Image (cartoon, rainbow, N blue to C red):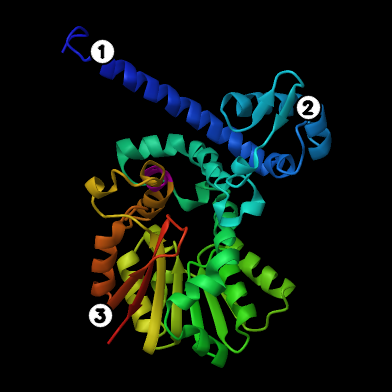
Amino acid sequence: MTIEQIDQAKAEAFAGKMINVINGACLSLMTSIGHRTGLFDKMAVLPPATTAQIADATGLNERYVREWLAAMATGGIVEYDPVSRTYKLPPEHAASLTRAAGPGNLATLTQWLALFGNVEDGIAEAFQKGGGVPYSEFRTFQELMAEESAQVFDATLIDVTLPLIPGIADRLRDGIDVLDVGCGKGHAINLMARAFPNSRFSGYDFSEEGVAAGRAEAAAMGLANTRFVAKDVATIDEPAAYDLITAFDAIHDQAQPTKVLRAISQALRPGGVFLMVDIAASSNVEDNLEHPLAPMLYTASTMHCMTVSLALNGEGLGTMWGDQLARQKLAHAGFTNVDLKQVPGDIMNAYYIATRD
């Protein structure tokens, strides 16, 4: 097809789309900087201010603040008054950009772009040779994942998420054994342990850094009912040891998720419950075309979740393994009853409550 034969209007529209993509990617990096440096948090409580005033309030270098503000103003994230030469973060924007927004803080997600950029060379090589980029190359993964999940756990875990399981709050108050698979830095375990002191909580994760952080937080909180172990969760061999097992956005990252789910099923006592929180999506691309976060999630899959599994010769499920495959694997693991629930306001996750007859 020659240049004369193409639909020029369609070509120009797509070129415009690509310009928006490039601008959006750049604004994402600048948004990450705004989050990490606390600029958004401080601007949310400041009146319209000059670059010097904002730099003074944040303790940051004015020249960098000035250039960052120019990107934010031209990108429509902050408002600029050319008469007074002042900048303001509108409260409507702060609701999606500040730590005070809790789970609504979308600025945390922008930090992943820099992380993914650091492994781009390895990903490109994997496209050519197969295999994957190992977990060890993602130096800030634990930190970013802990920050993002903590926002959700603090807001919803005890009062919203756990009550999705009928009767579990009463059982936790009476005292049961709980395991969190892929616990990361252990914040979920510690929140549950504090809320339900009669129950016993264990957290497994293959990251030594993660379990060390979990132990440190438990000690700081004065908890005596937690246990953290650095462990490949595919090696769990504890028949009928737990009454409740949780996995928060962890199963799709596993090298051997089929084996992990089977081990979880076998580790539950009669009447036990498995709460699997994972990405809300379909296993079919065509069903995800209108998913508001699909491009980001497929990118995260390519740049992290799928590749770390493939680096271990794993199944490479990827972030968007989807509901159909999730149900199939849960059934294969021995779960005969699977109830899917949602948490209002959480468009990212699906909440599977799985039990055996």
Side of 53 where 158 appears, left or right: left
Say which residue appears at 51% left-offset and 71% top-offset: 160
Magenta run includes residue 299: yes
Q: Of the residues shown, which amino acid type is indicated by label 3?
A: Thr
Q: Of the residues shown, which amino acid type is indicated by label 1?
A: Gln
Side of 349 where 49 appears, left or right: right
Q: Main secondary structure of the magenta part?
A: helix
Marks 2 and 1 close (CB-CB < 8 Å)? no
Q: Which residue is mark 2?
A: 50
Where does the magenta region start and end?
Answer: 298-303
Side of 196 where 312 appears, left or right: left
Above-or-below relation of 216 to 66: below
Q: Element under label 1?
A: helix
Locate the C terminus and report the quarter of the image it occupies.
bottom left
Q: Which residue is mark 1?
A: 8
Pick whichever, 231 or 142, lies toward us.
142
Pick whichever, 336 or 209, lies toward us.
336
Pick whichever, 63 or 115, lies toward us.
63
Say which residue appears at 54% left-offset and 42% top-offset: 110
Q: Of the residues shown, which amino acid type is indicated by label 2?
A: Thr
Q: Element under label 3?
A: loop
Marks 1 and 3 close (CB-CB < 8 Å)? no
Find residue 80 and report its horizontal and vertical position in percent.
67, 25
In this rendering, does residue 277 appear at all?
A: yes
Say which residue appears at 36% left-offset and 57% top-offset: 280
Tell which circle, 2 or 3, labels the residue nearer the N-terminal end.
Answer: 2
Q: Which residue is mark 3?
A: 336
Find residue 177 and report its horizontal and vertical position in percent.
51, 86
